[in-house]
Image (cartoon, rainbow, N blue to C red):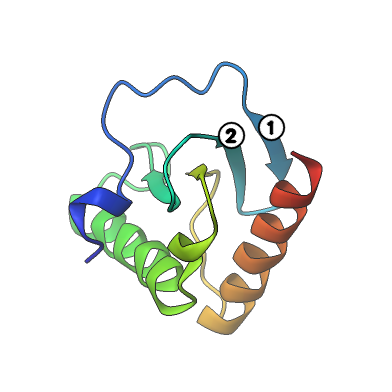
Amino acid sequence: MLKRKFRIPKGESFAKAYDVHFPLFFLKIKTQPLSYSRCGVVISKKIDKRATVRNRMRRVMSSIFEHHRLYENKGYDMLFILKKPFDGSREDLEQMVLSAVKTGTQKI
């Protein structure tokens, strides 16, 4: 689980964020003045009604963020919003997340 300082607090506004779209999710990314990056994952009940499944998806996304140390990037808030459940391998998801973060940080 991510440390609290690497998680986006509730109520954070993403009105002026840059969007990166992928088949499984889209990423809203914006700059912020802190020396580290923060991550958030949103999964609606439309994806799956069961909380255990949604929590598992959230843990997988957070572990990818933590494993690749994406919080060491300087000053970004990254909000991942899942569009559909991922059934493929974790490696495919990791590649999608890394390319989304790379694309988003280059555009800002």
Residue type, mark 2 in image: Lys
- Marks 2 and 1, Cα distance to the nearest angstrom? 6 Å
Counting from the top left corner in percent of width and height, residue 108 is at 74, 38
Q: Secondary structure at mark 2?
A: strand
Nearer the observer, 33 or 17? 33
- Mark 1 sits on what residue? 18
Q: Residue at x 44, y 19 (%)?
A: 13
Give the x, y percent position of residue 105.
70, 50
In the figure, is residue 10 to the left or right of 73?
Answer: left
The residue that label 2 is drawn on is 30
Q: Front-most of 92 and 72?
A: 72
Asked if the residues shown at circle 2 and circle 1 are in contact, with their CB atoms under 8 angstroms apart, the answer is yes
Disc tally is 2
Q: Amino acid at mark 1?
A: Tyr
Vertical order, 99 against 105 (above or below): below
Residue 43 lies, with reference to residue 36, above or below; the image says above
Q: Residue at x 42, y 63 (%)?
A: 61
Q: Is residue 80 visible?
A: no
Residue occupying the point 27% across, 34% down: 9
Q: Position of residue 30 (x, y in %)?
A: 58, 34
Q: Position of residue 47 (x, y in %)?
A: 42, 45
Q: For this view, does 105 lie left or right of residue 76?
A: right
User: Label 2 neighbourhood size at 10 Å, few (<14), some (14-19), many (20+)?
Assistant: many
SS for dot 1: strand
Q: Is residue 85 above or below residue 43?
A: below
Seen from the viewer's position, the closer of residues 41 and 10 is: 10
